[in-house]
Image: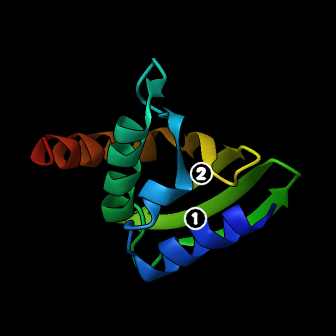
Amino acid sequence: MAEVIDRWHAMVQSGNAADLDSLLADHAVFYSPVVHTPQEGKAITRLYLGAAFLVLFNNDFRYVREIIGERDAMLEFETEIDGIKINGIDIISWNEAGQITEFKVLLRPLKAILLVKDKMAAMLEANQ
């Protein structure tokens, strides 16, 4: 079922989040590195991931390591924004239908978390 990750990579490489609607399960949950409660539902998960496309997925973004299981994967990434090097992990789980059910993002270092928090907040406010 690694085609879920293949589809994710294709979206990231293209910079186009249009396929998110078909890739996300209706009851998908997004776990943010800065919001203390899970964001539940396809619409809010799509909103957060769509903002991440605009904030994180720049020319410096690259996945550097992957661990892929039967229904979940951990993808380590690196990027740079405003001169701050960012290291993070996407933990993605999916169902039998090949739709993402959980998407968790972990970031480091603290400077990166604070920078991404501010940029994501601005992006989310602009989209509401």
Residue drawn where x is 15% and y is 48% of the image = 127
Q: Residues within 10 Å of mark 2 (few under 14, many from 20)?
A: some
Horizontal arrangement in the rendering, residue 32 relative to residue 122 (left or right) = right
Residue drawn where x is 76% and y is 65% of the image = 65
Residue drawn where x is 81% and y is 47% of the image = 71
Element assignment for label 1: strand
Res. 10 image quadrant: bottom right
Element assignment for label 2: strand
> x, y (%) of residue 13?
51, 80
> x, y (%) of residue 40?
45, 26
Can you tell which mark lies on residue 95? none
Horizontal arrangement in the rendering, residue 16 relative to residue 121 (left or right) = right
Q: Residues within 10 Å of mark 1 (few under 14, many from 20)?
A: some
Res. 93 image quadrant: top right
> Which amino acid type is shown beneath numbered disc 1?
Glu
Q: Relative to residue 107, is residue 13 depicted above or below?
A: below
Can you tell which mark lies on residue 88? 2
Q: Quadrant of the C terminus?
A: top left
Task: Find disc 1 in the rendering and name its residue.
Answer: 78
Q: Relative to residue 64, is residue 47 depicted above or below?
A: above
Q: Is residue 66 visible?
A: yes
Numbered-mark total: 2
Task: Give how far apart the Cα atoms at labels 2 and 1 are.
Answer: 6 Å
> Which amino acid type is shown beneath numbered disc 2?
Gly
Horizontal arrangement in the rendering, residue 23 relative to residue 91 (left or right) = left
Q: Are marks 2 and 1 in contact (CB under 8 Å)?
A: yes
Q: Is residue 85 visible?
A: no
Res. 103 image quadrant: top right
> x, y (%) of residue 74?
74, 51
Q: Relative to residue 65, is residue 113 depicted above or below?
A: above
Q: Quadrant of the N terminus?
A: bottom right
Q: Quick one: which residue is furthest to the top in this view? A: 37
